[in-house]
Image: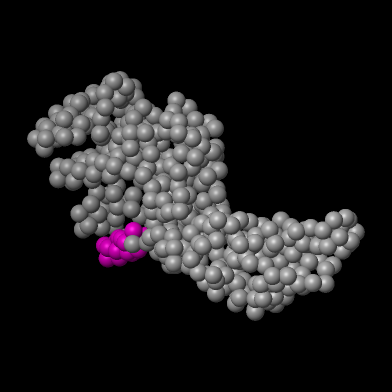
Amino acid sequence: MAKILIADDDPTILSLLNKILISKGYEVKLAEHGGVAEKLLKTEQFDLLISDIKMEPVDGMQLLKKTRQLRPHVGAIMLTAYATVATAVEAMKEGAFDYIPKPFKIDELLATVKRALDYQKSLSEQISGTGHIEAKKYFGNIVAESDQMVNVCEMIKRVAPTKTTIMITGESGTGKELVAEAVHSFSARSDGPFIPVNCAALPETLIESELFGHVKGAFTGANAEKEGLFEASKNGTLFLDEINSIPHNLQSKLLRAIQNKKIRKVGGTEEFDVDVRILAASNRNLETMVKEGSFREDLFYRLSVITIDIPPLKTRPEDILPLAQHFIALEMEGGEFPSMDNAVLSILQNYTWPGNVRELQNVIQHCLTFLSDGKITKETLPSKLIVSYEENPGAQNAALTGEFEKGKSLKAFLRAKEKEYLKTVIDTMGGDKAAAAKELDISLATLYRKLPEEAQNE
């Protein structure tokens, strides 16, 4: 049975909670203030902390912060007779599971304790003793916990064995090259070369030569014949990343090479066959570029026979923690895994990740650089994540608020519907949140925790 630490400077509350929780089969330890609780946390293992906020000499918020440092995987429920939204928000920011104002109902308290323990158990089942989340991986390196990424991987399996060209779309940093590599490795060309090229990084004056090669004397400085990337990719795969950067005057030659599987070197007169599969990627909407006249329509349709769209990280929160642990594993190279504080888990899951998976990888590298005592704590995170979180403590990322539509997960859909229902009940009660909480049979603190920040202040 779970072991619970209770900290409160009111002997009556301590005695009451002790009797209630012991009667339900829990193992209980009592602390008459935060200082005693801190000493117990240093020497004993607990599954849950229940703490009053207003105590001396160590108050509940100080104890909560210390708990996050000493026992990052211990859940916390905060109690207080001084119920304010600001205090509730601060407690949630520091990683508390829930917040219950005094006086409390016994049934409500027990239900909250059960939910907190269930949540911690679920978290512990995801994270092993080494702190490693067992992620579902495909093709060696693609982490796919979310339904959206599982669908991407299933698409790769289906189209990789074919000979057709494939367009991979998605925001910068979503992992388009990783998907292209997976397509190649799962194809009949896997023994051949996989050559990625970032078209945006090639100077416009040299891109034709880089792709198709040139003959000696083709232009000033062409002192020898050069093999182009089409030639170098023989019997393999050529991945043209950021193909939207290909100059318009070169797009017709690229189209011809893809259609006829023949190329002519810059300055040359002869055409020769090239056996290469083309994969392309773009971080811009090519259909819009076609309408603008900056991208050839026939080339667009030739490249987009099959399209694989990679959703942004903010729309698939299920992938965030498995990806984080995947990057930790890459960096640690078999070493001991660091633990990850609950506050860090919350910040990572609530951040919007404008830089997508690439940004997450950079954040993990930052955390490991500033690692202290084998723990990834709030202090090891880049300041921009902390600032973003503290400026909007009640925020959930788009994946949890239902702001996105494409690729919406079941979890995101249910969360969005939950918020709609909460708003409906509050409106029905004339904006009285206490009455709404009573109608919903939840604590007022829980209601505030589930509401978006803007709704909390209404």
Q: Is 19 situated left or right of 409 in this image?
A: left
From this viewpoint, which residue is outermost toward the left? 23
Q: Position of residue 373 (x, y in %)?
A: 45, 25
Could you tell me which quadrant the N terminus lies in? top left
Whether residue 360 appears in this view of the structure is yes
Q: Nearer the viewer, residue 108 or 400?
A: 400
Q: Is residue 8 above or below residue 342?
A: above
- The answer to whether residue 311 is magenta is no
- For the point 44% across and 63% down, which residue is it? 157
Q: Is 75 situated left or right of 28 in this image?
A: right
- For the point 69% across and 70% down, which residue is it? 273
Tally the marks. 0
Report the span colored magenta.
411-429
Quadrant housing residue 32: top left
Could you tell me which quadrant the C terminus lies in? bottom left
Q: Nearer the viewer, residue 216 or 305?
A: 216
Q: Position of residue 422 (x, y in %)?
A: 30, 60
Q: Is residue 315 above or below residue 292?
A: above
Quadrant housing residue 305: bottom right
- For the point 47% across and 56% down, which residue is it? 314
- The answer to whether residue 421 is magenta is yes
Q: Nearer the viewer, residue 14 or 339?
A: 339
Q: Main secondary structure of the magenta part?
A: helix
Q: Position of residue 201 (x, y in %)?
A: 71, 56
